Amino acid sequence: KIYGMLNIKGLVERGESFYNPYLNAVVEDLEKQELAVQSEGATVVFMDGWTNRDDEPLPMLVRKSDGGFNYATTDLAAIRQRTSFDASDGGEKADRVLYVTDAGQAQHFNM
């Protein structure tokens, strides 16, 4: 009903596992752009202006030290798939993507 009120058509809902094939490419592209670096065995992005309680740079983890991925990487992969990939490559070429979450996700999206 809400999608109808917002005139959203053709929406395909996908679980997180759908994006697994895209995760390595997200990290590789961040590394190529010199945005992602190694820190304590993990791959992270340090965002300007984000610090921890000790005023040290706060990392956004994109690949854990064990090689696993997390929500940030999955969200980046989802954005790429939804906005950048042609339909022939499994993309949607969306010109607008809306995320609706609870307040507990605020820091994640602000970074």
Image (cartoon, helix red, strand yellow):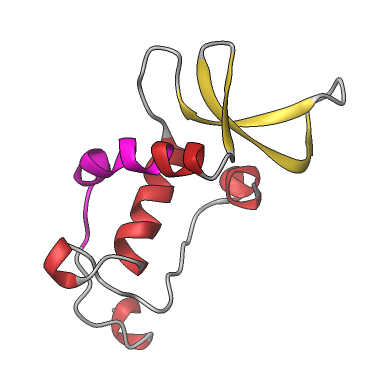
Quick one: which residue is furthest to the right in this view?
55
* 50, 4: nearer the viewer: 50
Where is the N terminus found, in terms of image quarters?
Answer: bottom left
Residue at (24%, 38%) from the top-left corner? 20
Q: Give the side of residue 59 with respect to residue 87, left or right.
A: right
Magenta part mainly helix, strand or loop?
helix
Residue 55 % position (x, y)? 87, 26
The quadrant holding residue 4 is: bottom left
Residue at (41%, 31%) from the top-left corner? 70
Residue 107 % position (x, y)? 65, 44
Q: Reply yes or no: does residue 19 show up in magenta.
A: yes
Q: Reply yes or no: does residue 7 show up in magenta.
A: no
Residue at (12%, 68%) from the top-left corner? 88
Give the answer, above or below, for where 42 lies relative to 73: above
Give the answer, above or below, for where 88 lies relative to 30: below
* 41, 14: nearer the viewer: 41
* 24, 79: nearer the viewer: 24
The quadrant holding residue 91 is: bottom left
Quick one: which residue is furthest to the left in this view?
88
Residue at (38%, 28%) from the top-left corner? 69
Q: Give the side of residue 23 with respect to residue 32, left or right.
A: left
The quadrant holding residue 39 is: top right
Give the answer, above or below, for where 99 lies relative to 61: below
Residue 30 % position (x, y)? 49, 42
Q: Give the side of residue 63 with respect to residue 106, left or right.
A: left
Identify the magenta region: 13-27
